[in-house]
Amino acid sequence: MPVDSKLERFRTMFLDECDEHARTLERTLGALQRGARNADLVDDAFRAIHSIKGGAGMFGFDRIVPFAHIFETALDGIRTGRIAVSEELMTAALRATDCLSDLILAAASNTDLAAGYENNMIGTLARLAGITIESASLEPAKPQSREPAASGGAERWNIRFSPHAGLLKRANEPLFIVRQMQELGSLQVTADMSALPPFAQLQPTDAYLGWTFELETERGEAAIRDIFQFVEDDCDLSITRREAGSVSEDTAPQALLQPDVVMAEPMASTIRVDIDRIDRLVNLAGEIAISQALVAQLIDQSLFNANPRLFQELSQLLTHTQNLQDSVMAIRAQPIRTIFDRMPRLVRELAEQTNKKIVLRTAGENTEIDKTVIEQLSDPIMHMIRNAAGHAIEDSEERIARGKPAEGLIHLSAEQRGSRIVIEVGDDGRGIDRERVRNKAIAKNLIASDAVLSTEDIDNLIFLPGFSTAETVTNIAGRGVGMDVVKRNIQKLGGRVSLRSEPGQGSTVVLTLPLTLAVLEGMIVRAAGESYVIPISSIVECRASWQKDVGEVAGFGEVLKMRGSYVSLIHLNRVFGSAAAAFKQQSVAIIAEIEGGGHVALVVDEIVGQQQVVIKSITDNLDPIVGIAGATILGDGRVALILDASEISRLNGSRRKTVQTFNSGIDSRRNVA
Amino acid sequence: MKILAVDDSPTLLEILVSTLVEAGHDVLEAGDGAEAMKVLAVDEVEMIISDLHMAVMSGFELLHKVRQSEVHQGTPFVFLTTECDDELKRAARHAGATAWMVKPFDPGSLVQLVRRLGPA
């Protein structure tokens, strides 16, 4: 590998590592700030900053090094008990962590932060920790260089080196010393064997020999002393300058130990693997599952009867395949901690900006979830936390007036339930003001003024596009994106969003996500003579006798009446087959949620069943096809396309009309069924 | 030469390992002192290069254990650390460290040090 790309790889690796260390700092300092007094926390924090400093020096991130150095000194002070932990100090340390993260980010993106950006922070930290900043202490340690002695010119040195008996036991090796001295200049060595005992009394692990070195070098005494630094205590040493020469004899002893090999448990280890390889493995495991289902289908019932063991072995194979698939998926899984650990900073900054007191509590940080899902969860969670801090949680006076603790609480939790991950973001703030939400929705023409809505319906209005309850746009929560974006993003991941709220007591948003994006729970349907898959996560309900509820709305085409509201009706037969395809008696209308909060009714010929399918991308070979999210291979070996209900509804020309929009313009409808 | 490299920073460990491998050495790696002990229990190495501050077992503790082991009590043990405090160096010397190199290290100097400490 060329040196440059290798260095680049190390650099990227180190910046990733820094990110991890920053989160460790965040976690440990946060706990200390909240009052925890635990030596391990301080140690963890110290090691994190220490590693950042070490690596930063290696890569020449010269703004990180001095900063990390002061930070490290402060933490070391705490570690050794020289500096007392105080809330003020920890708050400063947390801010310093934020500042450090910014420096790391800047280094990662090759951008330069304003000169002196971190100086304030360094000053504060140093002041609180009682550290005097000398310009020298800001200097990172440089690789040791060999400078010639100030005096210049070669000098002759006479060095007597007599090891004590125990020198070898400390794994010191006189030969190293000889070699190091050779590097300094021209060297002559004389061995002194006078202390060598008779063979019978010789202890093989003791040192008996001594040496006299005559060295001619331009380097000063310090350079010579340096060589002996690690043996100083185990020898008699004299170094004198003189003008003489003598004969040399190099008789340094060799290492004396011939050890036995001890067998013990093999080491536990981790390896780093390219994500592409794992993806291939995931795909292959999926293929195996499919092939196996195919084989199982091909085996005739009569064969099972003839050979009962066949059935037994096949079930066994099924279990193994399932385990294989689970294990492979587990490789891609990461703890959600990677996201949760970023949130304390956010909450801290939000609390500062809004002048509120807010505590964040997290639970289930170790819940594991697919890497791809994790990557896309960060924004929605951040958005919901912004909402909670910006809108939901009241300021201290208001909270006290309402009989609540002055400190607002945001809780963030994750847990696995079956094959799904449930993430909750909750607060103990105002809760949803349903009257206000309703009025707002009417004012924004999202619902009819006389619409009858359950409390749940009202709560869910906040997920509609264009809905935002904040009267003024703040930079905390209201940036034109609302909960509709959260919902859309979660739906893209095959997840669902729901909300429960208690006026005056707070709200909780519940995100339900699949464990992985590689497989999905799908409903297999037939239309126009082909099988299709509709993701279960988007299906609201299925209706067998739907024909009687069909109507038509001018400009919207066919609609299906659904408990007082209307949804656009799409015949998959017509989308994928001939326009004239007739209704079949047993056809079913599948009501699916679409992006933006509305619904669409997809009419299919029949429902075949429900099954987990492995998602295959078709965009590797084809341009994206509107309405098709991917493909899968069914148990019978046939390819089935996975439908995207939102795209299909758009394809049909209904242009994202929502249920509520229909409700407000419904007068001109007429029945055709 | 067979060398055990110990560092809890994956990046620095990787740099250290790659420096040594390029210089033609066989390198075993460990992410902390405890891992290092597991390696040393099954493999005999000719040199140990270790970080000082590590979570599970610090460099000092590792050095102490190494010096007590039968197989490795005489194996050269080099500290590779950002620390350059004389007190610490003295403590390391007393505990039986063979050499001390300050991070950030210059790969050339490290290779040279290893060559110097290695068997003749």
Image (cartoon, coloured by chain):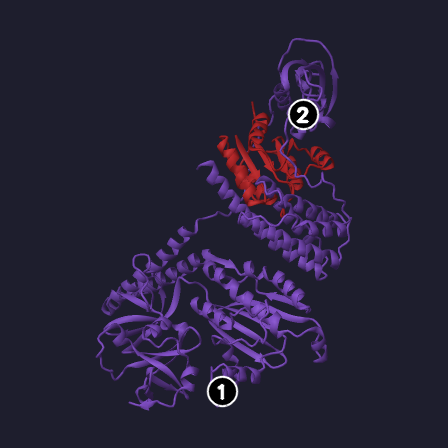
Chain colours: A purple, B red
Q: Position of residue A584 (x, y in %)?
A: 24, 82
Residue A514 in sight in this render: yes
Quarter location, residue A635: bottom left
Crowd tier of the residue under label 1, counting other residues whose Cα lies within 10 Å: few below 14, some 14–19, many 20 or above? few
The residue carrying mark 2 is A227
The residue carrying mark 1 is A453
Q: Position of residue B18 (x, y in %)?
A: 50, 37
Q: Is residue B111 left or right of residue A279?
A: right
- The one nearer the camera, A647 or B12, is A647
Nearer mark to the viewer, of 2 and 1: 1
Q: Is residue A490 left or right of residue A637?
A: right
- The one nearer the camera, A185 or A351, is A351
* N-terminal label among 2 and 1: 2
- Residue A176 higher or lower than A525, as above or below: above
**Quadrant location, the C terminus of chain A:** bottom left
Q: Residue at x 65, y 8 (%)?
A: A247
Mark 1 belongs to chain: A
- The one nearer the camera, B51 or A506, is A506
Residue flagged by tag 1: what amino acid is it? Answer: Leu
